[in-house]
Image: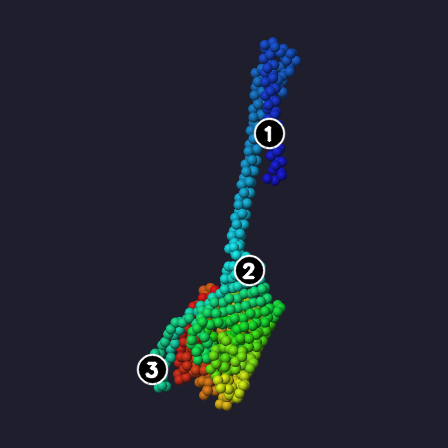
Amino acid sequence: MDRSRKQWIALAIASLAVHASVAIVSAQEGSSGASSVVSRQSGISGQSVVSGQSGVPGVPVGKDIQSQLQDLQRALDEAVLTNSAVRTELNQARDSYDNDSWLNEQRAASVMSLVNDVLADASQRVNLYGDGSMMGWSDGFHLSSADGLFRLNIGGLMQTQFMSRWQGTNATAGFGQYDEWRYGFGVSRTQLSFDGHAFGRGLTYLVELGWGRNDPYNHTSNSEQMTPRMWDAWVAFQLNSETQIKLGQFMLPFTKEAIIKSPYQMAIFPSLVEYRMGLERSQGVELDWKNNDRHFSLTVSNGSAALLQGLLFGNEDPTPPLSALGSDTLYSVTMRHEWKLLGEWDQFNQFTSPPGSERGVLIGLAGHRQNTESNSPVPVGGFPPGIFWGVTADMVMQFDGASLFGAVIYERVLDISVSLPRLNLLAFVAQGSTYVTNQTELFARWESGGPDREAIAGGDHLQIVTVGMNHYMDGQDLKFTADLGFSFGEVSGFMANTQAGWITDVRRRNQVLVRTQLQLMF
C-alpha cells in the first residue's frame, strides 16, 4: 500500500473517532438534561429550571421535556448515520487493500512461476551432479564444459539409395545376353561425426568414421568393397582471426565438388568427372587463410591416388593410410584460391540456394603438383618416375531460390613409362537448379570429358546429362532426392564408377540410370 492511501485511512479513522466522541458526549449531555427535568419536577433540582439551562446542546431554553427528548433523538440519529458512513468508507478502504494485496500476491506467483521455468531450463542444460558440463541440442547434439574450454558436437548421417539401370543387350560383343533392367538397394554411407574445440576455441578438431565404400573414387581394385572406414580426422590450430593450420586426414582443396561435403551435394552423387579427376583425401598439413573476400589454402600432403599411385600402378587406397616412408610420393602440393564477390562464406558450403537466402558469387582457382619417388628407372614393385599436375577453375552463383555452377578441369601425367610418356585429361561440369516451391527444387547437370589416349585409358569422352529433384522436408537434415541420368557417349572403364551407378559401356550409347535417395542427418 502506498503512503497516500495509508494517510487517507488514518484520516478516516480519526474522523470516525471524532464522530463517535460527539455521539457519546451528546448522549451523556442528553441524559444529564433529562435528569435535570426530572429533578425539577420532583423538586430536587430547581436550580436547573431557575437557571434556564438545557441539557442538550443547541436546544432552546424553556422547551418542554418532550421537545428536548425529540431533539436528543435527532442528535443520536445523526451520530448513527455519520458513524455508518465512516464505517462504510473504512470497509471500502479495507477491501481495496485486500484486493491490492491479492493482486500483489498474484504478481508474485507469476514471477515465481517464470523463475521456476528458467531454473528448470537451466537444470536441463547443466549437469549439476557431474563436472558442471553443458549438454543439449542446438542444431545438433553437444556436450561442453561449464567454462567453455571444451566442446564436443555429435552428428550422424545415413544415405539410403535405390538404383535402377537400363543397358541394351550386346550379344555380338562377346558379353552374352543379360537383362536390360537391373535394380537394387544400397546404403552408400553411414557415418558418425565428432567435432568441437579443446583447451579453448583456438584448437578445433573433426573425426568422421562409419561404414562405406573403402575406395569410393574407384582408384584401386577393391573399390566396391564395403568396410568400416574413416573419412576425415584432423586437428586445427587457430593462429589468429584469419589464419589456421590443420594437420591430419582431409579432402585435398582442389575441385569445388570435393570441398562440398556429401550431404550438401545437389545430385545424389558427384559427377563422374569428380570421381576420376578429383584428388580425394590424403594426409598432410594445410595452411588456411581467410578474410572477408578471399580464401587461400596451401596443402603439403602424401599425394593423391587419382592417377599415379592408384589407377596406373595399383597402389592401395591412400586413406588410411598412405605410408610416409614407403616408395610413393616424393612431394605433393595443392593450392586453392577463392574470391567471394557477393554473399557470405557459409552459404557456399552447399550448392543449393533456398528461397530467402542471400545472393552470392564465388570464383575458385586451384592447382596440384606431385612427383613420385625415383629410386630406380622402373623399380620392382614400386613406381616409375612420374609427374602429375592439374589445374581447375570454377564458379558458383546463387540467386535466392536458384543456383548455377560450372567447372573446368585439366590434368596431365608425364614420364610414366616408355609406352605412356604422357596422358592428358580435360573435362567440364555445368549444373543449375531452381526452386518450384519453398521445399522442392529441380536441377540439371551436364558432364563431359575424359582422357585423350583412348587406346590406353578408355573409349570416347563422357557425355552424361542428369535431371532430378530435391524435396527438403527439414532442410538438408531430412531430404529426398531423385534423379535420372542419360549417357549419350561411351562410358569407358577408366571413367566408370559403380558407386555412382555408371558401369563400363564401350559398345552401345544407351545407358540410363535412375537413382533415389533418402538422407537423414543430425
Secondary structure of the residue carrying numbered label 2: loop
Q: Relative to 311, say whether 100 is above or below.
A: above
Q: Quadrant of residue 497?
A: bottom left
Secondary structure of the residue carrying numbered label 3: loop
- Residue drawn at point x = 42 percent, y = 79 percent: 487
Q: Amino acid at mark 3?
A: Gln
- Residue drawn at point x = 55 percent, y = 33 percent: 91
Q: Nearer the viewer, residue 10 or 241?
A: 241
Q: Where residue 120 appears, x then y in whole percent?
A: 51, 52
Residue indicated by mark 2:
145
Residue 50 in view of the camera: yes
Mark with earlier residue (1, 3): 1
Residue 16 got which mark?
A: 1
Q: Residue furthest right?
A: 51
Give the number of callouts. 3
- Of tags 1 and 3, the one toward the viewer is 3
Q: Nearer the viewer, residue 480 or 314?
A: 314
Q: Nearer the viewer, residue 329 or 360?
A: 329
Residue 177 got which mark?
A: 3
Residue 272 got which mark?
A: none
- Residue drawn at point x = 57 percent, y = 79 percent: 333
Q: Amino acid at mark 1?
A: Leu
Q: Where residue 367 appears, x then y in whole percent?
A: 56, 79
Q: Residue furthest bottom?
A: 418
